[in-house]
Amino acid sequence: MARSRAVAVRRVYVRAKRAHHKAKFSLPLAALAGFGPLAYNLWQDSKMGSVAPQQMLSDVIASLTGWDIGTGTWRPQHLLRGAVPIIGGMAIHKMAGRFGVNRMLARAGIPVIRI
């Protein structure tokens, strides 16, 4: 009976080629729409004309953090005008990315808009 020779097998791992995409400009609409209520409140305050810039800054801080600088208290109803819509818009943007909506928009040829 003849013995068979052991042959060493050399394995070569080939790296997968990555597709190179040109960076394109896109606007995440859901994330930007979250800033709408905050911008609207600032616009309403500036329309009145009698509101001081310090008061407008205080309103922005209260809308984003809930902390009212004038009274030194935390009020969650202030968050409904700033932080809650922003976080909601970012969550919608994240979910749209997970479900592939942005990829579908890109393949359909819609140029700048993303959810």
Image: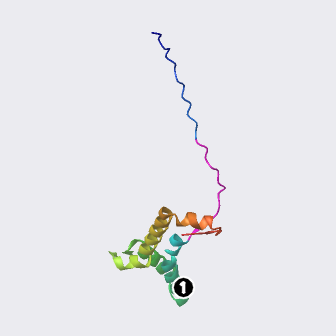
Q: Up-down: is 29 above or below 19?
A: below
Q: Give the dominant element type of the magenta stretch: helix, strand or loop.
A: loop
Residue with the most extreme front position: 1
Judge left or right: residue 74 versus residue 27.
left
Q: Name which quarter of the figure residue 102 lies in.
A: bottom right
Q: Up-down: is 70 above or below 13?
A: below
Magenta segment includes 36: no
Q: Name which quarter of the figure residue 68 lies in.
A: bottom left
Q: Position of residue 93 (x, y in %)?
A: 49, 67
Q: Up-down: is 100 above or below 68?
A: above
Residues 90 and 36: in front is 90
Residues 87 and 3: in front is 3
Q: Position of residue 22 (x, y in %)?
A: 67, 55
How many numbered discs sit on the rendered protein?
1
Magenta segment includes 26: yes
Instruction: Tell me the element at label 1.
Output: helix
Q: Position of residue 57 (x, y in %)?
A: 48, 76
Mark 1 nearby-residue class (10 Å; few <14, some 14–19, many ≥20): some
Q: Up-down: is 40 above or below 5?
A: below
If the image is split into quadrants, where does the N terminus sit?
top left
Residue at the (58%, 39%) spot, across then down: 15
Residues 22 and 12: in front is 12
Kind of residue at disc 1: Ser
Judge left or right: residue 55 versus residue 24.
left
Q: Position of residue 65 (x, y in %)?
A: 40, 71
If the image is split into quadrants, where does the C terminus sit?
bottom right
**Label 1 belongs to which residue?**
46
Residue with the most extreme top position: 1
Residues drawn in magenta: 16-28
